[in-house]
Image (spheres, helix red, strand yellow):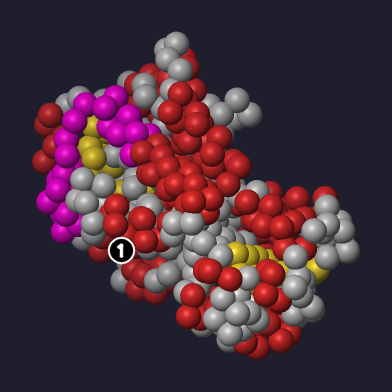
Amino acid sequence: MKLAVIGTGYVGLVSGVCFTLNGNHVICVDKDQEKISKLNRMESPIYEPGIEALIEMNLREGRLSFSADLQDSVRRSDIVILAVGTPSLPNGEADLRYIEGAAAEIGQAMEGYKIIMTKSTVPVGTNEKIRSMIAAHTNHPFDIVSAPEFLREGSAIQDTLHPDRIIIGLDNPALEDTMRELHKGFTDNVFVTDIRSAEMIKYASNAFLATKISFINEIANICEKVGADVTEVAQGMGMDRRIGSSFLQAGIGYGGSCFPKDTNALIQIAGNVDYEFKLLESVVEVNKGQRFMIISKLHESLGSLRGAVIGIWGLAFKPNTDDVREAPAREIVEALVAEGATVKLYDPIAADNFRQQYDHPNLRWCGLPEEAAAGSDAVCLLTDWSVFKDINLHKLAESMRRQVLIDGRNVYSKEQIEGTGLTYHSVGRPQMGGLSGYSADAVGVV
Ligand SMILES: NC(=O)c1ccc[n+]([C@@H]2O[C@H](COP(=O)([O-])OP(=O)(O)OC[C@H]3O[C@@H](n4cnc5c(N)ncnc54)[C@H](O)[C@@H]3O)[C@@H](O)[C@H]2O)c1
């Protein structure tokens, strides 16, 4: 089949590239000419493990191309896939301006029958609006399909090629075979439903996963007060198949381009029909507060942060991506600067993206984790990149001015910390019994 994927971001680029692997010809379209030029030079505009090799292979073999010309690409395709961004408006609602712009252009371009498939996350009823917007510009026939995307940045290729399920929302049953054919080889687990339910499945899924995260973070906060260990609690809970172990890692809360905006959008979707989604409102509230646990723990160990030097490890909202949208690091770093600290930042991939969004004279940009730690009063681990797991913690402690390590992702074990001289705070785990060289009291820095 011939496909045009509109929007060459984290979803569009990965989906487009993966659809070439099961025999389709794909044009990836973006209005950002710079992205298209980069892609034509076989450089990925996003960091996603494995993507550049697939781009190169498929470009060379002629199954993949890149274009900034939406209308020409639509004319040359049977299926047009919408993968443009749907960011948040200030009130939390999804901003549909990119969807609307693309829909109008698709309508203007059409010279024959097309299937329009929406992968972007859109509020319930949006695909019907897309239909009206396209119909306002063309008399040619077309069908609408909702196919929400569930990939995770960092493992996006694997997730696309081997998804748990494909959700297809349609109102023309004749399309089901085409949709199964399009996803052939990815999974047989194709769930076909109506369009509105498909749209809701995406929001409900993200809201549920966000709920799991806020739930375990609240359990972690209680664990700290009652002397339980949340990692043990989560492991024990996860062994119950009704609960499952994923998304039960306590930490500084979720960020990224999806959970924050999709939870807020679902609260708005409910509000628009006079329903107050109280549970989800609490999930969002808990998440907002959780990141500031880092600041409280710094105060606990260092007192005032004025004049303190704080090392930050990790700026991306999660490992294996360069995406810093809604990353907890942003608010944490801003709070540290506001309190008068000097902040030394390190991220293996996302530092440039972070710096484009936020810079300040009190920030020092570091090329190695050890550099961010040297001379610091505390190091805060915010993203669990694997590079941090292998750091020599003895050397780390020696290089610091005061030996405080705040582990916002529960990366280190008791054994790794023991004997290093570090005052170690993690999330929802006890202070590990005041072991020698392990608690704040033991090293006299409180
Ligand atoms: N990023 C994720 O992990 C993820 C996962 C699942 C679903 N989603 C959803 O997928 C959608 C896309 O997300 P993303 O992270 O890939 O966004 P993104 O911001 O990385 O990419 C969107 C791209 O669309 C382009 N664009 C906008 N309007 C256009 C137009 N008229 N013509 C051509 N290109 C246009 C932009 O230039 C941009 O490159 C969103 O609705 C998001 O919620 C994202």
Left or right relative to 434: residue 271: left
Residue bounds of the magenta highlight: 178-205
> Which image quarter: residue 125?
top left
Nearest the camera: 97 or 407?
407
Residue at disc 1, secondary structure: helix
**CA neighbours of label 1 inside 10 A, class few (<14), some (14 to 19), many (20+):** some
Q: Is residue 114 above or below residue 1?
A: above
Nearest the camera: 372 or 147?
372
Q: Position of residue 362 (x, y in %)?
A: 85, 62
Left or right relative to 368: residue 185: left
Residue under the image location 21 percent in, 26 percent down: 194
> Which image quarter: residue 314?
bottom right
Residue under the image location 34 percent in, 45 percent down: 149
Residue 65 showing in the rendered view = no
Residue under the image location 58 percent in, 85 percent down: 419
Residue denoted by label 1: 158
Residue under the image location 49 percent in, 47 percent down: 222
